[in-house]
Amino acid sequence: MQDLLGYALFCAVLTAAGWALAAHMSGVFAGRRNLMSPVLAPVEQRFYRLAGIRPDNAQGWKAYALAVLAFNGLGFLALYAILRLQGVLPLNPAAISGMPPDLAFNTAISFVTNTNWQAYSGETQLSYLSQMAGLTVQNFVSAATGMAVGVAVIRGFTGPKGAGLGNFWADMTRSVLYVLLPLAAILGFALMLQGVPQTLQGAANVTTLEGAGQILPRGPVAAQVAIKQLGTNGGGFFGVNSAHPFENPTILSNMLQCFSILLIPVAFCFLFGRMAADRRQGRAIFAAMGLMFVAGLLIIWWAETAGNPVLNAGPNMEGKELRFGAGLSALWAAATTAASNGSVNAMHDSFMPLSGLVQLVNMQVGEVIFGGVGAGLYGILLYVVLAVFLAGLMVGRTPEYLGRKIEGREVTLAMLAFLSMPLGILGGAALSATVPAALVSLQEAGPHGLSEILYAYSSAVGNNGSAFAGFGAATPWQTTALGLLMLLGRYAIILPMLAIAGSLVVKSRAPVTAGTFPTHGPLFVLLLVLTVLVLGALTFFPVLALGPIAEQAALTAGQSD
Amino acid sequence: MLTQLRPAFVLLLAMTLLTGLAYPLAMTGIARLVAPGAASGSLVFRDGLPVGSDLVGQAFARPEYLHPRPSASDYGAMPSGASNLGPASAGLRDAIAARRAAWQAENGVSPPVDAVTASGSGLDPHVSPENAQGQAARIAAARGVPVADVLALITAATEAPWLGLYGQPRVHVLRLNLALDAALPLPPAGTN
């Protein structure tokens, strides 16, 4: 009961804050001045001058997509170079050597695609320079890339006929300057006060009361943890991520981080309504996402609180911190898999199979239950296109959304984007379940082993980044395969969605008539949820039956291995 | 494509300077001014020497101290870790059975769940109040003091959920052990 009241208050505060942030963001992306402009506008203008761009110069979808690819491609090269060369670069108090090529490849792609999968442990494999100038930068700009694409796609759906999709460079810069950086500074400061280290000193050596030595890793942690949550990045400073007491020391720090995971994705729903000049449209999308989120949360909460029937030992506390307990670990697990964040405050590998099932579904539907910053919104618009198409088929009318006809081209592109999820997840997992070089990564045989593989590939393609961490992801096979699939999961959605936006924005908007299917009421919310569940989740049902469902059934029957 | 390279290059460089250097270094500077202790690991000192961090769990094995939860990395922090064992695994079932037997043998009562499960971080600084109370008799015997004295310290050290809504009641292991040493010091070696 304590947990459920806590969840309700959390959701209420989150919704209110997301609504307020959306008001701020709609001004930012329209180029209007705000409270921070006196300080930050000169910086922004200088960036534009140096870069030789005009922020008001709207791009078509192809130019916008090229800009995204150029910026992310260069970001990948720069990060790869830093990781390989960290051994000879400054700010390396622990004298850590350069990363091996396959791990650096995996890590660089992971952070550029906003996945932030960790096949390494930060405390022993990354210098402070890599953490700051490498990873923290991509934490900001990969999030800003997602936000920019999200805003561009919204403009395509809602903008006036013949307008462009906006300017990627301006959208990206404004995302960092007016949204991510101020929020990260506030959150980072609060976390630092709670005890998250923010120092350039190396590890501390202490002698315990029993006379044993203990080495305590430190670093500029608070600044990075702040953006890792706000930007739905999720890659931790330390290997065990936000379970580590230096990343997440207190219950307050836990609530602030959990809130930050969902804040911008929630705000994007309301931003959509504002940009569509019809706030009901944003609320409908928020309602659909919220329903799926709460349903998943309650299942995880129930499974973790009930605990393991075989062990008969109270709530499931293996892999969980005592201060968070089953309640706050369940909330985090639901938030981080729904929102494409991927940070953890408890180890998902040790959650009950039913919880693992929800986590998998959250990722496999394509990270559209709030999803990544920007990415969740353009992802759900993919399902919106399919949902209105299905509705059109049922009533025999040409489908429309926000007054624009959804025709063959849009539906084809949406299906193309949609199919990248099953292709990447099922194809990658199937290959990984059969190739001997891949199978060495498994910690366990049987259904749980299949869940481990499935989780890794769902996380990579969904650009989530969390893991069943018993899975040994640091083999050349896995770093390479997962790295390539992170690219698929990111750009095989971004490019078709930008193309759909480009195709819609040139269409004229039909007036609303009595025959128009309303896309803001409960019927549409239900249709959208069903579309996500039928298309997204049922695609994976057969393999889920062999993994988490089989494992849960065995546990309920009182069997363990 | 070429027209995109200049802004890509310039903005990546600008963002690296702004978010990769200026932002974390400014935060570090502010941290040093505002909260130097919290920002450098919340170290705990006794007699001028660092004995741990207020936030990070440590191994305690002697009978006179409160023992922490099991840790998959045995409280090593470079790096720390979890068992990551699946809920149906034989490894987890056997580990829990072994921990349960050992805890019962040591304390004479059956253990609460947090005493037989390893945390996610491997560095959990807390135990549950039930876990601490279960160890009280052993601690009191080792220190040659009444159990009530130890229980009183445990009660005083028990923290409640935040706002009554979030998190679990808990006892901080290192803080309690420091309090035990301060309030109920061990008899000098060899006197009993």
Image: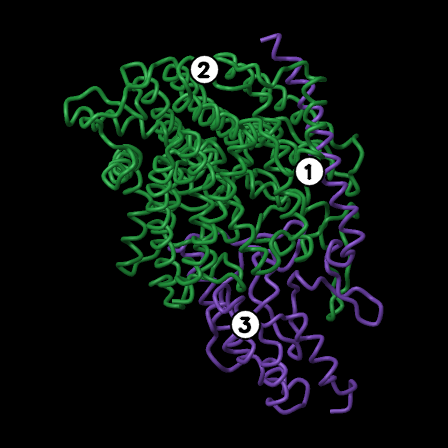
Chain colours: A green, B purple
Give the CA separation, mark 2 to mark 1: 40 Å
The residue type indicated by label 3 comes to: Ala
Front tag of 3 and 2: 2
Q: Secondary structure at mark 1?
A: helix
Q: Disc 1: which chain?
A: A
Give the residue number, with chain letter if any, for mark 2.
A163
Q: Position of residue A481 (x, y in %)?
A: 48, 27
Nearest to N terminus: mark 2 or mark 1? 1
For this rendering, which residue is in front, B79 or A176? A176
Q: Disc 3: which chain?
A: B
The residue type indicated by label 2 comes to: Ala
Q: Secondary structure at mark 3?
A: loop
Which quadrant of the figure has residue A172?
A: top right
The residue type indicated by label 1 comes to: Gln
Q: Is A368 on the left or on the right of A122, as rendered?
A: left
Give the CA separation, mark 3 to mark 2: 56 Å
Same chain under badges 3 and 2? The reply is no
Q: Which mark is residue A131?
A: 1
| Residue situated furthest right in the rendering | B48
Which quadrant of the figure has residue A430?
A: top left
Please tell me whether residue A353 is drawn above or below residue A285 in the rendered image. below
Q: Is A400 on the left or on the right of A285, as rendered?
A: left
Q: Are marks 3 and 1 in contact (CB under 8 Å)?
A: no
**Numbered marks: total:** 3
Q: Which residue is pictured at 34% across the width and 38% down the height? A: A280
Q: Position of residue A218 (x, y in %)?
A: 72, 50
Q: Quadrant of the C terminus of chain A?
A: bottom left
Q: Which mark is residue B160?
A: 3
